[in-house]
Image (cartoon, grey):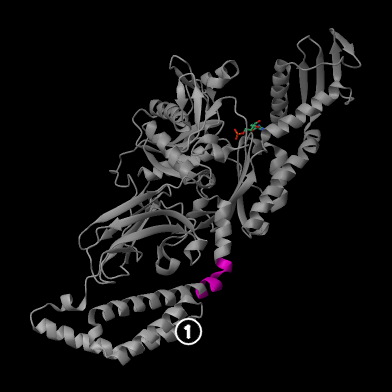
Amino acid sequence: MALFQIAEPGLSAEPHEHRLAVGIDLGTTNSLVASVISGTAEVIRDEEGAALLPSVVHYAADGTVTVGAVALRDASRDAKNTISSAKRLIGRTMKDLADTHNLPYDLVDDPSMVRIATAAGVKSPVEVSSEVLRTLAERAEKRLGGDLTGAVITVPAYFDDAQRQATKDAARLANLTVLRLLNEPTAAALAYGLDNSAEGVYLVYDLGGGTFDVSLLKLTKGVFEVLATGGNSALGGDDFDHRVLCHVTESFRGGNPKAVFTVNGQPAQSLPVHILSAAEKRRLMQLSRAAKEKLTESEETVIDFTFDNGDRVELPLTRAEFNGMTCHLVQKTIAALSGVLADASVEPKDVKGVVLVGGATRMPCVRDCVERFFGFKPLSNIDPDQVVAIGAAMQANKLAGNTSADDDWLLLDVTPLSLGLETMGGLVEKVIPRNSAIPIARAQDFTTFKDGQTAMAIHVVQGERELVDACRSLARFTLRGIPPMAAGAARIRVTFQVDADGLLSVSAREMKTGVEASIQVKPSYGLSDEDIVRMLKDGNGRAEEDMRARELREQQVEARRLLESTRSALDADGDLLNAEERAEIDRLSAELAAAAAGDDVEAIKAGIAALTKGTETFAERRMDRSIREALSGMSVDDALFDETPAEEDKH
Ligand code: AMP
């Protein structure tokens, strides 16, 4: 039962009032800000004309903080205080990061989130990211000429709740209102207007400098659902640079007849042995990258490298040669992509469109290979470095209320798994089914299980299975102060609310007295999309098994409830029975208790029926007595429901 839905922030904008909203692609290496200006989404550049802001922050001992290209310059001079890649650390603990990478700065362990030791004190990745966000927001405010209403910030589809929450905190610290966190692949799909295209499955192929991410999105009624994600966190454009670098160093040893050498200012047949200095290595890396990028436009380039001592190598390189030496890298991306398709049981022919994201997708060999694999051209006409920021800007514009009324659907993301509560017998009652468009709030009424129960333990779970043990536990809390009533008389309204960023809060309210308890679910770790796919598959495959288990648990709960009420009736009015009648009820109770301890559903059902029948006369006599008592001045309620001591239990 849907009780209410949450209005989107900012939807009630006055006509003609244009609210300043931006989309921010908060990247590991670089970040961008974009906005819809005069009806078109565009990236906002800094005063020097640069679109990309390096996601780098330098902390000096005197407290000076610099961000972006200025901070990057400090990286080689003062690496320990120059913080890059904060996105890898945000919302992570040391345990999450174990053996992933060695960063040039020092990490400090903290149970909630890893921190960074700098000359200006210990900093959290949230603070570092907030500096980047603040710089971009200032850039945008300067260009747009006013205060920002808010921002849509993009995060990887695989970011869990802790990483998302930490990203939101970074925005808050930067004084930015987050209109929404948006999955990066969803943003890219929006930039291409795929939300208005045919329903179906779309693939986002994101090859950056150091990582490769694949996301499979399913579009239904304008809502994108992330079906699966995958990729290779150690594969990117840098590996292509490295192949070129190896090709050049091989030529030093005479391994390439096309190489032209100059030694001591004279043409030479070969080179003396050189051990590359750090500066030479750095220059060679830069040249290799430049050559790779040049070959995107040209069929051929020449790598012209001069050693520190003036010796020189000129090496022509054709696109065909480059393609040959990097083919295995492109194949690796196709293998990863095939794995993601297989995980989601999607055939390549079922993919309706492919979006290219990330600078390295400019390489013709990548585009050709993707086209060959799918049999159609991928979408690539938006700058692959800017496409995520552009999609985020378009979404921000809508959320700020700048679009026309018939264009104002806003629900882009959905809950990946069902959210529910544990009920008696370890069963799950789903409150928000999977694939519900967010934001959403749903309420459901529950009741007490025992007479006089004054507290209720609320256990929030996530998953598709019928039994609590097979789902993921998200949070527990207790509602206390329920007035003692008969079992089943209390009305406890439990409300689940998922905000636009996928964060869940749950509240429980006793409707008579209004006592309330609530919890915001901020798990310290979340589910990867692989986990979600696995849990979904698990849920589908086991539906029948779950149904049987559910029926058994339900009958066991019913048996316990009947035994409990019989026991309290015997305690209160046992004197209405003669010894023989009492012995018969005790026997039926014992039989039912024994059946309920086993797993034979039919035996439990039979036991319930027998005890119900066996206590009919007793129930009639109790009713007669209570009517007599009522007539003699007591209320029927008082007579029917005896107060048993307060007891905490599940509902
Ligand atoms: P990103 O992390 O998305 O900014 O991607 C950076 C990667 O894209 C680096 O490896 C760049 O060398 C690569 N890249 C940028 N422009 C080009 C280009 N024109 N051709 C080939 N690779 C490029």
At label 1, which amino acid type do we have? Ala
The answer to whether residue 537 is seen in the rendering is yes
Q: Where is residue 10 in the image (x, y as percent from the top left)?
A: 32, 44
Residue at the spot of label 1:
603
Q: Visible in this render: residue 298?
A: no
Element type where label 1 sits in the image: helix
Q: Which of 609 and 75 is in front in this view?
A: 609
What residue span does the magenta drawing correspond to? 540-548
**Side (left or right) of 143 relative to 454:** right
Measuring from the top left, give residue 232's x and y in whole percent.
65, 43
Q: In which quarter of the image is the C terminus?
A: bottom left
Left or right: 537 as drawn, with respect to 399: right
Q: Which of 561 and 238 is in front in this view?
A: 561
Of residues 461 and 617, the one nearer the viewer is 617
Q: Is residue 425 above or below residue 78?
A: below
Give the prevailing secondary structure in the magenta stretch: helix
| Ligand 1 quadrant assignment | top right
